[in-house]
Amino acid sequence: MASAVETFKRIIDRHLDDGVRMPVPDYAKVCVMNEYGYAYFTHQGKVKAMNYSTAIFLINDDVLALYVRYEVGDRSQKYMVKTFDKDIQVGDYVIVPSSGPNGHLAIAVVCDVDIDVDFDSMSIVPWVVQKIDLAPFNETVQQENAAIAAIREARFQERREELASTLMNHKKIKSLPLAKKKERGVYD
């Protein structure tokens, strides 16, 4: 495994001058998993690298670290992200950069808030683009459901009146005792 550690050191050295730009490859002996299932690389004092994407946590106490989860293919991934928005809570939806090569955005759900940052991790910690406010969407859906219910009721009443009018115009149906008004148990 010495070759893996040496490879890891070379990769870290490439990133020292301009900061971490890409995640470091996975090596079992230098990769650690924390209590949340978040994997990160550790150099265990052998390499003094700086993950510049976590530096903001050292210079600004208003930055909040979160874990978010979003679907990647057929599996669910959990990632650390950062934000200034203190109103974000567990269960909120946020827009985050995806981990794909094209730099697309993804919608993720917040799993944990105000977590401790591991400054020895070499994983890039991206910014939350924004929290998704579902209130206008939910209100629109609720209004649409009310409109659909009113339309269904109106169509039901219209169809009922149409059928009743059609049936009451037939002489055979009009002559049936059931079609006549009932008073005190006796038909007219």
Image: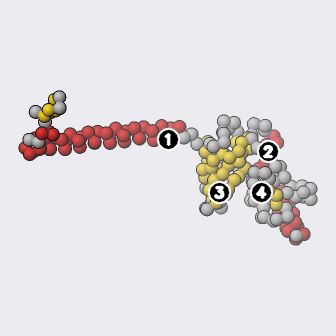
- Residue named by callout 1: 137
Task: Check the picture and name the quadrant holding the C terminus.
Answer: top left
Which of 110/172 is in front?
Answer: 172
Residue 129 showing in the rendered view: no
Q: Position of residue 157 (x, y in %)?
A: 26, 39
- At label 2, which amino acid type do we have? Asp
Badge 3: how crowded within 10 Å, few (<14), some, or many (20+)? few
Badge 4: how crowded within 10 Å, few (<14), some, or many (20+)? some
Q: Which mark is residue 110?
A: none
Query: Which badge, 2 or 3, is on the more N-terminal residue?
Result: 3
- Residue named by callout 2: 116
Query: Which badge, 4 or 3, is on the more N-terminal residue?
Result: 4
Q: Are marks 2 and 3 in contact (CB under 8 Å)?
A: no
In the image, is residue 129 above or below residue 14? above
Q: Are marks 2 and 4 in contact (CB under 8 Å)?
A: no
- Residue named by callout 3: 76
Closer to viewer: mark 3 or mark 1: 3
Residue 42 showing in the rendered view: yes
Q: Where on the picture, by quarter, is residue 166?
A: top left
Query: Which badge, 1 or 2, is on the more N-terminal residue?
Result: 2
Residue drawn at the location 12% of the way across and 39% of the way down: 177
Query: Which badge, 2 or 4, is on the more N-terminal residue?
Result: 4
Q: CA distance from mark 3 to mark 1?
A: 25 Å
Among all residues in the image, which is located at the extreme front?
Answer: 185
- Residue named by callout 4: 39
Q: CA distance from mark 4 to mark 3?
A: 14 Å
Q: CA distance from mark 1 to mark 2?
A: 33 Å
Instruction: Say which element carries label 2.
Output: loop
